[in-house]
Amino acid sequence: MPAKATFGIDRSGNANDATRIDPIWVLHGFGASPIWMHPLVKRLKEKGWQASHYRYPSVWSQIDREGERLARSLDESYRSSGVPIHLVGHSMGGIVARVAAEMIESDSIGKLVLLCSPNRGSHIAGRIESWIGRYVPMLKQMSDHKESFVNQLPSPSIPFGIIAAQGDLVVRPEDTEIEGALDWMLVPGMHSAVPWREDVADAVDRFLRFGSFRETSSSS
């Protein structure tokens, strides 16, 4: 579990609603690059959000190291603009975002959306960690073993929601679930294709504004 770091701004709570002028940082998953998230970023921009890619090394680093770097970037942005940033992370990108949310004590994060993130670990990572975990620490950290890094993380204290994929062979839908989520949604498709789906972009948009993936009276 990462040590909590204080960057000088006290958390006083997060607003329930957001407007589409707010910034969103989108994080790719293990072994991917920002281009993989381009369809989602493009659709969020078309809806009016200030969506952008957050780049980080996604193979040879460590999740806790990248989470700390993200936390510092969030704090620097908030100190400069005074505007909280929403985070959307696919797969391991969501875990990096969770680490950042745990490390930073500030209002710099708005809401968090986890797309197919291995919140309880990935059975695939668990199977291969004994082979290559020594050389690829990020995979070992995402193992479904009870003592793994990801299974020691507390639930986020910021508002968050989870989207899982029905045909996910990398992260089982039930392994995305953790306590405290405002909403959980299951969509068709495979693990890697979720950021490309139009219905996922629509659901992320609704959640960031209203705290729910589904149509409500306030979102209609």
Image: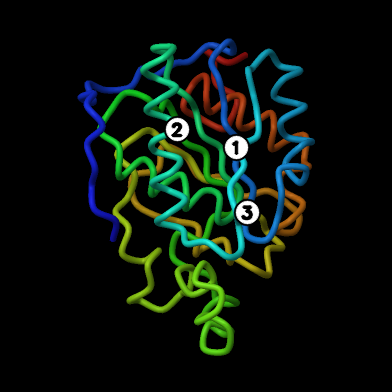
Residue at which label 2 appears = 73
Location of residue 131 by image quarter? bottom right
Q: Amino acid at mark 3?
A: Gly
- Position of 206 relative to 35 (above/below): above
- Position of 83 relative to 188 (above/below): above
Label 1 close to label 2 by CB (< 8 Å) = yes
Identified at 32% across, 23% down, the residue is 107
Q: Residues within 10 Å of mark 2 (few under 14, many from 20)?
A: some
Q: Amino acid at mark 1?
A: Tyr
Front residue of 157/219: it is 157
Mark 3 element type: loop
- Horizontal side, residue 62 vs residue 190: left or right: left
Q: Amino acid at mark 2?
A: Ser
Q: Earlier in the sequence, mark 2 or mark 3?
A: 3
x%, y% of residue 71?
Answer: 39, 38
Q: Residues within 10 Å of mark 3 (few under 14, many from 20)?
A: many
The residue mark sitting in front, 3 or 1, is 1
Identified at 32% across, 50% down, the residue is 155
Identify the colour scheme used: rainbow
x%, y% of residue 87?
Answer: 51, 34
Residue at which label 3 appears = 29
Instruction: Determine the CA span between mark 1 and mark 2.
Output: 10 Å
x%, y% of residue 52?
Answer: 65, 28
Residue at which label 1 appears = 54
Mark 1 element type: strand
